[in-house]
Image (cartoon, rainbow, N blue to C red):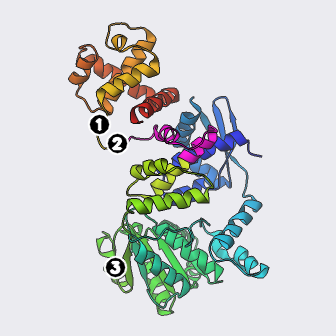
Amino acid sequence: MADPTAQRVWDTALGQLQIHVTRPNYDTWLKDTQGLRVGEGQFVVGVPTEFVKEWLATRMRGLVSQTIGGILGQPTEVAFEIIGRNGSANGRAAAAVVSEDLPLANGSAAQAIISSPVLRQHLNPRYNFRSFVVADSNRMAAAAAAAAADRPGEDYNPLFIYSSPGLGKTHLLQAIALRAAHASRNALYVTSEQFTNDFVTAIAQGRADEFRRRYRSVQLLMVDDIQFLAGKGRTQEEFFYTFNDLHSNGCQLVVASDRPPAGIPGLEGRLCSRFQWGLIADIQPPDEETRLAILQAKSREQKVDVPADVAHFLSDRARDNVRQLEGLLNRVVAYARLTSSAISLAVAARALAALTPTVSAPSDPQTIMQAACSYYNVTLQALVGKSRAKPIAEARHMAMYLLREDAELALKQVGLLLGHRDHSTIIHGVQKVARGLISDPRLSAQLADIRTQISI
């Protein structure tokens, strides 16, 4: 059984990791994990399968260790332990689909949903049409997606949705798949990477016929990130014939990309032409009103109260990416829970201070120096003086780093502010802090605290 403290730490870590990895990677490798145990210098993460354990251990151990270490304030080794897939958790996910999308009338219908093969895909039950915030920036794409789900093959076929990353393409494709499951339709949602891997594996194992039966026997096929098929000649050819077979039989195809068909380099002309047969719908970055509505919806979903000033603060930090906006909210909520604090502007600033600052203008040098003095409890006179006592030296080095990085001052300007020191002394101080931030989570926490003071 997971240790509650470990799980709270892991929830905080997931809030940060969600910002740094792609949505497909998060859903595939991190979504079904748990925080199991936390000890002196070690943290154990529970994973569902050996395959997930191996992937995380080889591809993400460094990032996860750094993230956990930053939260705990000390270097931490991360280990992964197989816990299997919890049956009750799967049941809750299925129930979530039933309750959050279209309510079902009886138990037999609910059983049909739970046993539907669509739930065995990497689908997020929260990605349904009810939770998608519709605005002018995405109205056409949302309406077309709903039509494709309700009347597959009739109105917009194929439906091609494109936008910059993090604006809701994956949400809409998975919402179609979930509604198809509700209607007992045979639907399949895959990424182009999964389609490619399935095809390569089928060819290597001599199971091409099985691959084609799987992909060409569905009523709806949703393919995410189609731009990654560019340059893959044999895979594009196989998808071309899959497309033709499904389209000619009146089956619905929905494709998502980060750019319109004609803008995908390396995409064969015949595929580009077919993508243009139906409707091409784009999603634009949300305006402030829409971002605030998204935050309101997500906070209701998590059953938390997010004050208006905190919502505006988060909205300003993620203007062009809904996924990042959600990740910032998750981080603040997890941090507040971990520290048993009510969500406030100060708590939100502290939770996000360790992330790369997104301020529009350089920080004020005098504010930086005062914040460093306050944090290390030294006077401004001592900061610019000649003393090399440890607290004063630490404050001085941190001030050098912040004046250089956040105030964007030249080395000579930093030296003049800190007692007319030469540029070689400033370089040494800045590099000392920079090296420390890589290896010492406590220094990262100190930097986060000082930046919080500066930003409030």
Nearer-the-camera pick, 251 or 315? 315
Label 2 element class: loop
Can residue 8 be seen by looking at this rendering? yes
Label 3 element class: helix
Whether residue 328 is situated above or below residue 67 in the rendered picture: below
Residue range of the region highlighted in magenta in the rendering: 332-357
Whether residue 322 is situated above or below residue 269 in the rendered picture: above
* Residue at the (47%, 41%) spot, across then down: 352
Do the CB atoms of the residues marked 3 and 2 lie less than 8 Å apart? Answer: no
Circle 1 crowding by C-alpha within 10 Å: few under 14, some 14–19, many from 20: some
Query: Residue 34: horizontal and vertical position, in percent?
Result: 67, 49
Residue matched to label 2: 359
Residue matched to label 3: 272
As shown in the figure, which amino acid type bears the numbered disc 1? Pro
* Residue at the (68%, 65%) spot, across then down: 93
Query: Residue 1: horizontal and vertical position, in percent?
Result: 77, 46
Task: Name the side, left or right, on which 371 lies relative to 37.
Answer: left
Nearer-the-camera pick, 129 or 235? 129
Residue matched to label 1: 362
Query: CA gap, disc 2 to disc 1?
Result: 7 Å
Query: CA gap, disc 3 to disc 1?
Result: 45 Å
Q: Earlier in the sequence, mark 3 or mark 2?
A: 3
Q: How many marks?
A: 3
Nearer-the-camera pick, 181 or 413? 413
Answer whether residue 334 is magenta in the image.
yes
Mark toward the viewer: 3 or 1: 1
Mark toward the viewer: 3 or 2: 2
Can residue 234 be seen by looking at this rendering? no
As shown in the figure, which amino acid type bears the numbered disc 3? Cys
Do the CB atoms of the residues marked 2 and 1 lie less than 8 Å apart? Answer: yes
